[in-house]
Amino acid sequence: MKLANQSTVAGFVLLGLSDQPKLEKMFFVLILLMYLVILLGNGVLILVTILDSRLHTPMYFFLGNLSFLDICYTISSIPLVLDGFLTPRKTISFSACAVQMFLSFAMGATECVLLGMMAFDRYVAICNPLRYPVVMRRAVYVPMAASSWLAGGANSLVQISLAVQLPFCGDNVINHFTCEILAVLKLACADISINVVSMGVANVIFLGVPVLFIFVSYIFILTTILRIPSVEGRKKAFSTCSAHLTVVVIFYGTILFMYGKPKSKDPLGADKQDVSDKLISLFYGVLTPMLNPIIYSLRNKDVKVTVKNLVNQKCFPK
């Protein structure tokens, strides 16, 4: 990514909650605690899926990728947020801002695709269980996960390359905690229609297509589950995909809530909404990565047993 020569802005100022210092201290402690839970929870899940040979299956391989992705996503933004809470006027260089935007955007797009891949895995497991070992063999699910990362990275590279070529020659204050791409584009002193169109196409590909794919997959899954004659069989089949479905609902539900809200026309209301939007975006960035390992641990018997065994071996070695 090359920075445009015409850019006269050397860096940006991240506004965050600098106008509300009392809130900053409270949110610093809260976000720090959530960040530690994210690192611990997702780190444990990655460790569990590596150490226990019984979990060397496509579902847990995707889960390990999801946990690693959540760690990368939060590392790319949360330390910057925490530093901003402690610094009255947080500044960030143009190049550092571009890197942070690239990482955050890449992780978000990758997660969208990865959740779609996980839905396909659950579809094959429930709708075609006899063919599952053949369809979801290692030579298939490893490239599937790799393609998620490549697609997310390629999309981010395109979007950020277009953004950094814009001239930024006026206001350099970003009304956000991090270099959020939409907040950065508002500061460009040039036509951003290409950026808007490009992001619109990307949203259709990385948000619309995976959502449609997941929706169709779960229609087939639910249809198959309802055809199972025994109640116990239906419950067991649904339990294998309930954790993934819960994560999908939280992930996409939060996105729809963030971007589907009506905008306030009242100036005072707009100011309050700016704070609200920033906080929702902030908690979206930490809440989903924090909940993912909790959901998969609580709703997954294999993970709970493995974690319990590892704790017992550590605390009570033979």
Image (cartoon, grey):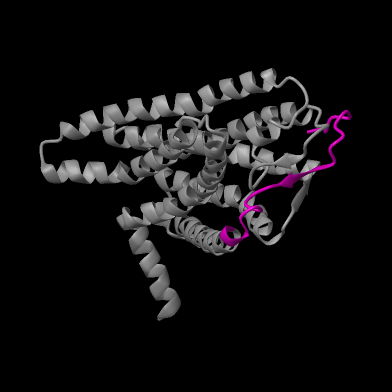
- Give the residue drawn at x 74%, y 54%: 89
Instruction: Give 87 or 312, whichever is nearer the viewer.
Output: 87
- Residue at image location 29% in from the left, 44% down from the top: 240
Please give the range of residues in magenta.
1-23
Query: In the figure, 175 relative to 186: above or below?
Result: below
Q: Quadrant of residue 307?
A: bottom left
Residue 139 can be seen in this image: no
* Nearer to us in this view, 218 or 233: 218
> Residue drawn 42% across and 74% down?
313
With respect to residue 77, does 312 lie above or below?
below
Q: Which image quarter is the C terminus in?
A: bottom left
Estimate the x, y position of residue 231 in percent, counting from the top left.
Answer: 12, 43
- The quadrant in which the N terminus is found is top right
Between 228 and 25, which is closer to the camera in this rendering? 25
Q: Position of residue 72 (x, y in %)?
A: 60, 49
Q: Is residue 2 magenta-colored?
A: yes
**Foreground residue, 115 or 129?**
115
Main structural element of the magenta stretch: helix, strand or loop? loop
Position in image of residue 69 (x %, y %): 55, 46
Q: Do we see residue 178 in this rendering? A: yes
The mark tally for this picture is: 0
In the picture, measured across the screen, residue 288 lies left or right of residue 10, that is left
Is 253 magenta? The answer is no
Within the image, what quadrant is residue 161 found in? Answer: top right
Q: Does residue 113 lie above or below 49 as drawn?
A: above
Q: Position of residue 138 (x, y in %)?
A: 47, 39
Q: Is residue 222 above or below residue 64?
A: above
